[in-house]
Image (tube, coloured by chain):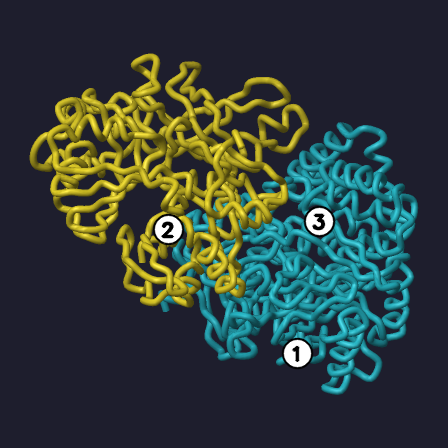
Chain colours: A cyan, B yellow
Amino acid sequence: MAVNQYDAIIIGGGHNGLVAAAYLAKAGKKVVVLERRHIVGGAAVTEEIFPGFKFTEFSYVVSLLRPEIIRDLELPKHGLKILPLPSTFTPMENGDYLATWDEHDLTRREIYRHSPKDAEAYDEYARVMARAAKAIKPIINLIPPDPSSLSIRDMLGLLKVGQYAASLKEKELYTIAKLATQSSADLLEEWFETDALKGTKAASGIIGTFLGPRSPGTAYVLLHHYMGEIDGAFRAWGFAKNGSGGVSGSILNAAQALGVEIRVECSVSQVKVKNGSAVGVILENGDEIQSKVVMSAADPKRTFLQFVEQKYLPDDFVTSIQNFRTRGSSGKVNIALSELPNFTAMPFEKGHESILHRGAVSISPSIDYIERAYDDAKYRQISKRPYLDMIFPSMIDPDMAPPGQHVMSCFVQYAPYDLEGGWNDEKRNELGEAVISTIEQYAPNIRKCIVGMQVISPKDIERIAGITGGNIFHGELLLHQIFFLRPTPQWADFRTPLKGYYFGASGAHPGGGVMGAAGMLAAKEILKDGN
Amino acid sequence: MFNLKTTPFHERTSALCQPQNWRKWAGYFSAGSYEHVLDREYWAIRNSAALIDVSPLIKYVIKGKDAAALLHRVTTRDIHKMKVGQVAYTGWCDEEGKMIDDGTVSRLDEMMFRLTAAEPNLRWLSMNAVGMDVSITEVTDEVAALSFQGPNTRKVLNKVVEMSVDELKYFRLMKNRINGIEVTISRTGYTGDLGYEIWMTAKDAIKIWDTLMVAGADYGITPVGILAMDMARVEAGLFMLDVDYTSTTHAWIEPQKSSPFELGLDWTVALDKKGYFVGRRALEKEKREGSLWKMVGLEVDWVGMENIFKRVGLPPQIPGMAVRGSLPILVGNVQVGYASTSTWSPLLKKYIALAHLQKPYFEVGTDVRMEITVEHHRQHAPAKVVKLPFYEPEWKRK
């Protein structure tokens, strides 16, 4: 039985689980990661769905992967490469387009074409957002203190936040207060007049939420996305070599090099509790693994409502986890292409390289367009004309598709988890068709280019990646679900009401995206507790 | 026109060079970069296939019965041991064992070599060839060269060459044909990645460029300028004349000179080789007594640097490209050396530098501090001496 005794058990081999395992192993702990699927990576996986075509199935860009994780775990040595995504291209309904490029003056000139006023406002907006992001960024690496607690640790933590808030200029505080309460539409309308610009900016405020651009609170999500921007050239933003699976793969290699044991096809049924403490896990096949530390890298609902018997948790805690919003609102359509779809707004000749395909293509012609897409979702329908965020991974990393052919990744919102009549094959086809016919409006040859297609609904995200509700952030980034409220008040410091049981995933502070921060911070807390 | 020369690829490179940021390289125009932002070019070297015009490299063909003897005498390598088809990287020194220049020696034939150099060396070579049966011809203008670097280069080359390059080993060369045109392909480069250098007659240059660009289209081929290459070469721990060391021919004072040992080139100094070579006695002495300086890698501690910037309320600000400028290195408050090139490494997410440190501070693991400028003030960021290269992918030699 010696084999089944560890210093720490990590439930779930997503990127956060792997990061936590690696940090614990680095501190000399004997760690095992238990993964339900045949591969690790969770929602950061790359799979060859059609021969030669690699799909970065769920998550598709690296935005906020913490640079210190990259350095601490030496991920580049283990294969991590984050490749640039230099542009965003928004085709417009009138046949024109709006683009932002990686060169500042090219972007300014492009926006100027639409509105000289917006071209100037764009710079100012970027500075204000970057300053606000810089102002709140230190909070990301902070263990959220509990404002109601009188413990020294929490008091010191609060003091830090307080000192920090006091160090902000009045103007910055106002900006942050406004960002925290406004809708992204209201915010953007204060700044810009070009519809496609507002639409495209607003889109990043709704990703992963079940809200529309006119819903209050979405401005904060815009800010969340600016966090990656302020490190300038040092950012870890882009498309990972071999897709998101490349990120998990490098963390996996690093973890294994540090001695972490990985068990795949190994489902956990229950956390074993003895005298009020977690003492290990019971697997679905009945086997038991022992450890004084168990960390869940699954979503909050699975972590607290499925793996632990409710009698071990306080009632109000259970209620608040039950109320945690994990409404999946997006899907993913992955397409294998024989050739690149040609966008009529900026066509390219055969044999010439198309510049727009190197970056993102956003179907977000206006705020109204996205709000309308949300209207459908509010009434539990798939958006007839959804917001799409598309990239062509094979243009960034040629190894993603056979030479001369391509893969395309389409993030699609809204596709409500709680669809009227429920999800089935027919509904899945409907989602695929909504995506293709939307693209077709701007790139009429799209259908001819398709050699294979995979449609992923929120239900599929739940089924395959094991995320309750299929929410890509394991829980929406809403103001009442972040910082000391994530996943629930009093328990935002990666500890749980069950001694020895920890929680370090996207549903914990600081939230979702292929970021790794929750896993890293949780591991550090586990070590602090003397485990 | 009275101007710098253009390389045989200029017709193509000038049409592609968007920022028009021409650099001067040995009297030629050389594209700094082809795009306004270096990211894609840098990553082409590390992830796909970078096409770099390196024609300005100074090249000599050394021919004749005593060709090997001349190079054996001038350089520090054991040239007589080189087989035909072998390439050797080497420095060459003056009588005091201090570096004049560095480059590659390619044995094209039993009695024919090609030597590349950063600067003109004809006079030095001729001085050393007195009484030898050898001809030294500069072929810089006649021979165009492309450096083709990155993990996908082998796949692309194999599409266009007559004979597969699969068996071409690291630091070997082969005669081959691309599109029917005679070329020499060597498994060499200045990036520390999988890569090749393609040598051709100047008149064939455009045809070879076009053939590669078409063949590489599906493999991410990207024309790359010398600015991105400069970042990659620092990651690879490769230095540059006049940036990281001063040639004895330019040095005004003794301390400006460097020996191959001081530059970490121990492995290229064949003290066991037969016969005389220039600088032998001095190098033997240095080997016996140990060197006073050594070029090493430095990794700046990011958190330490962040903290220094934090004091003025800024996130770290360092240039996103290689900087060729001297930065003092301290231990305590005493200067123990200097960094000659520093760069942000997009791959490693680290700020790294090539540095020259005095004994005993050049030992791996030594904690030092490197000068950084924070809001116009000199500060010193903690850094550590590390082994070179900073980055070495497994496929570099495979």
Q: Find residue A437 and report its horizontal and vertical position in percent.
A: 79, 76
Subunit of label 3: A
Position of residue B11 relative to residue B352, above or below, is: below
As helix, strand or loop, the secondary structure at mark 3 comes to loop
Report the amino acid beneath label 1. Ile
As helix, strand or loop, the secondary structure at mark 1 comes to strand
| Residue corresponding to mark 1 | A450
| Residue corresponding to mark 2 | B201
User: Residue visible at 73% across and 61% down?
Assistant: A361
Please determine if labels 1 and 2 lie on a single subunit.
Answer: no
Residue B275 visible in image: yes
Subunit of label 2: B
Subunit of label 1: A
Looking at the image, the residue that sits furthest to the top is: B253
| Residue corresponding to mark 3 | A101
In front: B11, or A87?
Answer: B11
